[in-house]
Amino acid sequence: MEDKESKQKNTTRVAIIGLIGTILTVCGGLTGALISGATTIYKVQQETQRLAIAAPLNDQPLQVNTRQIAISSSKVSKLDPNKVSVYQDMGFVIALPLSGWEETNKKTYADLFLEQATNLSPLILFTKWIEVDWDDQPLREIRYMEPVQIEFLEGSTENGVAVDPAQLDFDTYKFFNQFIILALDKAVAEENFTLYELALDWGTLHQGGVNTLVANPDSQYVFEQVSWELKGVRVNDRLADLTLQRWALFAQAPDRDYIIELQYVPAAGQSIQVWDDLQAYLDAFRVIH
């Protein structure tokens, strides 16, 4: 019989998925048909060095140097501790939080489900396929501490799907500019996914919102950009449409697969520095080899 804590966890998980889970009724598992159909959905490119991927309606692309994703242990020891955090146990390096940002305390994948209305990361939707298999997998999260408040109204839609405000658990939701790293033990991840399947499913969860996917057969990474459109909503007390921009880097180390997810919420009145900071976090991320 489940103990009280397990029941609470499962109840919360179901509730959270219900908040943004309309897509779960339209998305199935990663089947052969989906893989073959993906070639018509995704723009696949071959690149060898620096990628610059802009979101629609945003002329400033996010960039990643694919030759600098990996770093040797010897070079890690020479990094400036005043600028970066080194997580040897999880095999990566990230930048220290910049002004206005905060790194949350040590978390696991399961903890994402305990933040009702504060973290609508698409990472949680992998639960459709993995259930509780990733619950103890570690992650780190850096957030801009001024969230954008969203209220769904009659007629609101998420990526073209109608939202019924009467079915929601909260009146308003918080969307954060954030940088999340999920470090999956390869033995756990590969029970369900290869690195490329992680990328394809993450994109599929956005209901056709994928704009660009880049894969390089000579380097263990995938980089993609997606959009999530909210229409007819109230944003910080003003009626508006809002397009959340998301980028994800999928990378490998000998014993881990990584999902690095960036979310940019371009609300009116927000400092452009937020965008520059997200670029700085991506520039600093390294997988230790």
Image: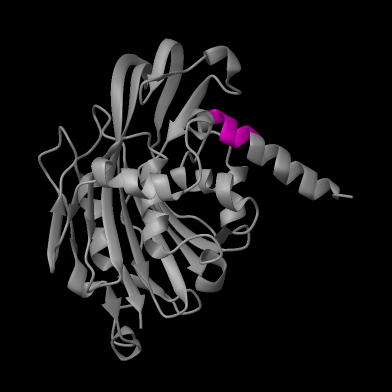
* Of residues 191 and 254, the one drawn nearer to the viewer in this rendering: 191
**Horizontal side, residue 135 vs residue 163: left or right:** right
**Residue extending furthest left?**
59
Measuring 78% from the left and 49% from the top, which residue is drawn there?
6
Residue 19, placed above or below residue 34: above
* Of residues 144 and 186, the one drawn nearer to the viewer in this rendering: 186
Prevailing secondary structure class for the magenta stretch in the rendered image: helix
Q: Position of residue 127 (x, y in %)?
A: 57, 47
Residue 206, placed above or below residue 89: above
Q: Position of residue 47 (x, y in %)?
A: 13, 63
* Of residues 80 and 112, the one drawn nearer to the viewer in this rendering: 112
Measuring 29% from the left and 77% from the top, which residue is drawn there?
70
Measuring 56% from the left and 65% from the top, which residue is drawn there?
191
Residue 108, placed above or below residue 1: below
Residue 225, placed above or below residue 284: above
Q: Position of residue 214 (x, y in %)?
A: 22, 56
Which portion, as a residue range, is magenta? Answer: 15-19
**Residue extending furthest top?**
154
Res. 204 in view: yes
**Horizontal side, residue 167 vs residue 101: left or right:** right
Measuring 43% from the left and 68% from the top, which residue is drawn there?
257
Which of the 4 quarters of the picture holds residue 82?
bottom left
Which of the 4 quarters of the picture holds residue 153?
top left
